[in-house]
Image (cartoon, rainbow, N blue to C red):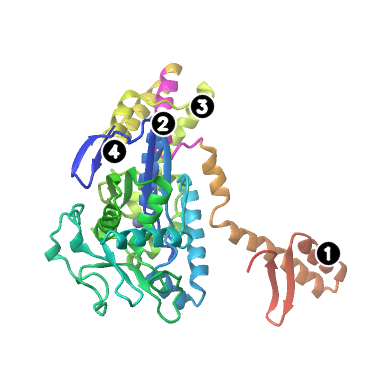
């Protein structure tokens, strides 16, 4: 299998560090907003990689972190007036829901930054001992970028061209381009104790520390969105290589979802939230659309393109269902051309072309009553769709759809219905009926409160 490596700018044969095993680390979300499709594209692209490597016989350890402490989380927690940790947890749950709806397999491990402060302190100590980092005494810890030969080899920039890293008021730095591993505590912000003072992690440090904790000093693939190449991944390399680790062998970056040629951002993206789009198309259709471009190509979003992808998917799905009626149950197979396409740096557009050809052959075979051809076309399509995470017979899609974002709305609707019954029972002074409804709900853990504003309900275990 060939993969493109951002660091070498070359596509070459993939050789795992240990035979039969692949370790992958992908930068996950900073959990401070509802996920939009730009966020989840990375999840889908690397899920396809993981599925393909697994089908190719590798035992894959897949790590995707959760950034649960960050400037943006602290700002948003003030704006929403809830504690930072509650905000982070709320949006982590929203990402989990989106990943489940889109059939993104759960990572082998999903570490949170705040759960790995000890490992970050160990890494900083190592860097300070090696003379690659320094603590100026105010509680900050910085990486000394001039101490490294390999700095900027991923983004291929010149050190002298770089703008200062971080805030201009960080006057303790040896060089304005030195970046913060650790940030001194500020009033009203969360902090953790370290030998250099109380503070909180810089964003880059967590990924170096967690990748090392779960995958060791060197591992096969590090992934993330294109926008992470600089500074995030460059700084991860700096920290890890300065610590003496070989770190990632291959760097892979997925391109963006764009709108009018621009990267989808939060200001543009509110209507592009997964929870909104999932009302227009099914999860499997949204996944098919987001996974349809090559991972290194921009995906220009339009509602028309999404609808077209959904219609195309329905055509494929209808054929597979029809094939099942004709030939009975069948398994997916990976045909030689589909294998060749996935092996070529995950050439999904070519895979889709093979699916279209197989669909044409299969539909013709139905009209010709050629059952053998119906079955082989359907098996080829199903095999390819499974790698794309879009097998319509995959039970996890049905299960995830049932647990979709609308379930809480449905629950509220059902309870409101019961409350309306109780209200009308009370109005006709049928207190036995009214009490029976209240007691029935109580037995399910749902408590009714009569307030001046009307009936309110709460469910045991929720806040
Ligand atoms: Zn990261």
Q: Are marks 1 and 2 in contact (CB under 8 Å)?
A: no
According to the image, label 3 marks what residue? 324
According to the image, label 4 marks what residue? 349
Report if residue 366 lies within the magenta region. no
Q: x, y percentage for residue 247?
A: 31, 48
Q: Are marks 4 and 3 in contact (CB under 8 Å)?
A: no
Give neighbour class at mark 3: few <14, some 14-19, many 20+ (Cα, 10 Å): some
Question: Regarding mark 2 in the picture, which secondary structure is present there?
Answer: helix
Question: Which circle marks residue 436 in the picture?
Answer: 1
Question: Regarding mark 1 in the picture, which secondary structure is present there?
Answer: helix
Q: Is residue 344 above or below residue 227?
A: above
Q: Quadrant of the C terminus?
A: bottom right
Report the image quarter containing ligand 1: bottom left
Which of label 1 and label 2 is nearer to you? 2
Work out how far the residue at label 3 is from the one at label 1, CA to CA, in angstroms.
48 Å
Q: Are marks 3 and 1 in contact (CB under 8 Å)?
A: no
Q: Residue at x 45, y 50 (%)?
A: 281
């Amino acid at each position: 299998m060939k993969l493109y490596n951002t660091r070498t700018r070359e596509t070459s044969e993939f050789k795992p560090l240990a035979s039969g095993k692949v370790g992958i680390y992908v930068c996950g979300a900073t959990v401070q907003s509802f996920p939009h499709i730009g966020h989840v594209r990375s999840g889908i692209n690397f899920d396809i990689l993981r599925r393909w490597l697994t089908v190719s016989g590798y035992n894959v350890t897949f790590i995707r972190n959760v950034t649960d402490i960050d400037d943006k989380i602290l700002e948003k927690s003030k704006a929403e007036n809830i504690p930072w940790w509650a905000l982070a947890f709320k949006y982590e749950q929203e990402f989990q829901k989106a990943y489940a709806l889109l059939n993104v397999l759960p990572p082998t491990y999903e570490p949170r930054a705040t759960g790995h402060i000890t490992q970050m302190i160990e890494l900083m100590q190592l860097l300070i001992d090696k003379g690659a980092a320094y603590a100026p005494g105010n509680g900050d810890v910085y990486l000394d970028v001039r101490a490294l030969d390999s700095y900027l080899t991923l983004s291929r920039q010149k050190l002298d061209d770089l703008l200062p890293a971080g805030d201009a008021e960080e006057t303790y730095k040896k060089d304005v381009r030195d970046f913060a591993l650790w940030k001194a505590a500020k009033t009203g912000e969360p902090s953790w104790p370290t030998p250099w003072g109380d503070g909180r992690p810089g964003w880059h440090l967590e990924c170096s520390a967690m990748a090392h904790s779960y995958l060791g000093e060197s591992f096969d693939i590090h992934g993330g969105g294109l926008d992470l190449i600089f500074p995030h991944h460059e700084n991860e390399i700096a920290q890890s290589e300065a610590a003496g680790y070989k770190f990632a062998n291959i760097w892979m970056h997925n391109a963006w979802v764009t709108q009018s040629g621009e990267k989808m951002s939060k200001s543009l993206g509110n209507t592009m939230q997964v929870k909104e789009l999932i009302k227009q198309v099914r999860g499997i259709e949204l996944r098919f659309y987001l996974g349809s471009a090559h991972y290194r190509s921009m995906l220009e979003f339009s509602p028309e393109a999404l609808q077209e992808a959904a219609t195309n998917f329905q055509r494929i799905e209808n054929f597979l269902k029809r094939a099942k009626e004709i030939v009975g149950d069948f398994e997916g197979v990976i045909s030689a051309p589909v294998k060749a396409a996935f092996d070529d740096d995950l050439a999904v557009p070519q895979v889709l072309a093979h699916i279209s050809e197989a669909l044409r052959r299969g539909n013709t075979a139905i009209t010709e009553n050629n059952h053998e051809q119906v079955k082989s076309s359907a098996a080829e399509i199903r095999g390819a769709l499974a790698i794309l995470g879009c097998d319509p017979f995959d039970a996890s899609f049905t299960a995830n759809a049932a647990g979709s974002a609308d379930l809480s709305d449905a629950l509220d609707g059902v309870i409101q219905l019961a409350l309306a019954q109780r209200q009308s029972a009370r109005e006709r002074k049928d207190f036995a009926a009214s009490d029976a409804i209240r007691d029935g709900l109580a037995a399910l853990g749902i408590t009714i409160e009569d307030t001046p504003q009307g009936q309110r309900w709460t469910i045991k275990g929720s806040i």
